[in-house]
Image (spheres, helix red, strand yellow):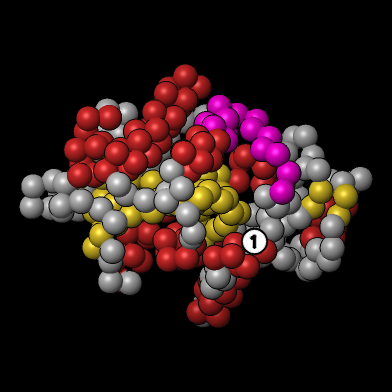
Amino acid sequence: MRIIVTGGSGKLGRTVVSTLREEGHEVVNLDQQGERGTVVRVDLTDYGQVIDAIAGVDDVHGGADAIVHLAAIPAPGLASDAATFRNNMLATFNVLQAAKRLGVTRIVTASSETVLGLPFDVPPPYIPVDEEYPARPESTYSLVKHLEETMAIELVRRDPELSITALRFSNVMDPEDYAAFPSFDADATLRKWNLWGYIDARDGAQAVSRALEVASPGFDRFIVAAADTVMSRPNAELVAEVFPGVEVRGDLGANTTLLSIDKARRLLGYEPRHSWRDHVEADAAAQP
């Protein structure tokens, strides 16, 4: 397919672009940054630029079969609330509206684990968390992600051929980030804000690829996380210490992710292949 990736110069975007290209797709990166020749520079808050860039750019491409929308101010606290809302909400509307006008019916968007209620200052309703309880946005960034999912629901209702898949990515990590992970064990509250979760960027890209391949018309949402937590300490110990009294559903496992990826496994065929433990153990083995 010819796939447009917005935000392809970002932390997750770089890996998504390289992965899709390795799979044989033609990929066009729309972003405001990136090296010359690797990106088409577009202000996604300008609808005219967005629809024009998706429709085609001179000798770069002549339209799209699918869109992966990752571009955004990527976390709470990086800009004012008003700036975050305006940028992220308007950019997503522009991309989805342009896709609809141009007849692009296969779309994957980056949602966020934050809609689950992060940073869990109010404990989650149960553990492991999943996609079954209503969104609980606790920041403007998270509110926008919830509204983007709601907008997608209404768009596919109006267009039965449209497929929009929202991937609720956990905290994105690259291999070089893993050296810090062993230090998390000293304080169980340090990473409790997302139930000690993370996602390797390569597995995030895998989830994007699977959604592009298998998603049906309509809307669906999926938590996308690694298969394990960032902690060496066992889950039962962590939950008892930090979230006493919260309902535990099923077997927590020793270090199994507490951001349930069962739905993504079942419906997308997603299966994480990368763990921070493999990298830390390999680094330790390499020491003299």
Depth order, front residue of 94/5: 94
Rendering coords of residue 256 (x, y %): 72, 65
78 over 28 or under it: above or below: above
Mark 1 element type: helix
51 over 14 or under it: above or below: above
Rendering coords of residue 107 (x, y %): 40, 51
Which kind of residue does numbered mark 1 sit on?
Answer: Lys
Taking the image as shown, residue 77 lies to the left or right of residue 120, namely left
User: Does residue 179 show up?
Assistant: no
The residue beneath circle 1 is 263
User: Does residue 90 show up?
Assistant: yes
Q: On the rendered image, what quadrant is the N terminus found in?
A: bottom left
Rendering coords of residue 89 (x, y %): 44, 30
Depth order, front residue of 76/269: 269
Q: At 16% across and 46% down in the image, what residue appears?
A: 56
Taking the image as shown, residue 31 lies to the left or right of residue 153, namely left
The magenta region covers 132-148
Depth order, front residue of 129/148: 148
Q: Is residue 18 magenta?
A: no
